[in-house]
Image: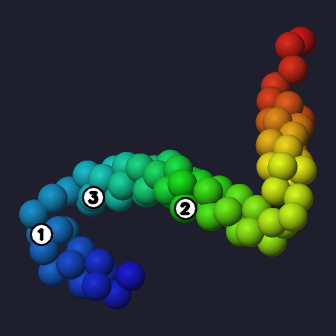
Amino acid sequence: MVAVGQLNGRYLVRRFPVHAIVTAGLGLLTVAGLGMPALASGLLIGNANALAMNRTRNAAGVASALLGATSFLIGALVSPSPA
């Protein structure tokens, strides 16, 4: 925050209107906000499943089925229902 604040104060406000800086900042924030869940899911889901399967080596099939069923159940619960 300090580095971007310095960049803003020294360079950006002298060259661009403030509303353009705010608009660009909100755009970058939106892109970052939308990108984070995708990146986090890619890093989290596969590794979490691998960790769960590693802990249940003797019952890997049951663990896999439980993970799959839970995933579908959560998807069904959070999806919008027809009116």
Residue 47 appears in view: yes
Among all residues in the image, which is located at the extreme top? 83
N-terminal of the pair, mark 1 or mark 2, is 1
Circle 3/circle 1 CB separation < 8 Å: no
Query: In the picture provided, is 41 more to the left or to the right than 8?
Result: right
Q: Nearer the viewer, mark 2 or mark 3?
A: 2
Query: Which residue is identified by label 3?
Result: 21
Number of labels in the image equals 3
Query: Which residue is identified by label 2?
Result: 43
Query: Which residue is identified by label 1?
Result: 14
Residue at horizontal 84%, vertical 49%?
61
Local crowd at mark 2 within 10 Å, few (<14), some, or many (≥20)?
few
- Judging from the image, what secondary structure is the residue with disc 2 in? helix
N-terminal of the pair, mark 3 or mark 1, is 1
- Judging from the image, what secondary structure is the residue with disc 1 in? helix
Looking at the rendering, in which quadrant would you find the C terminus?
A: top right
Dividing the picture into quadrants, the one containing residue 37 is: bottom right
Query: In the picture provided, is 44 more to the left or to the right than 31?
Result: right
For the residues marked 2 and 3, what is the alpha-carbon distance in whole angstroms?
32 Å
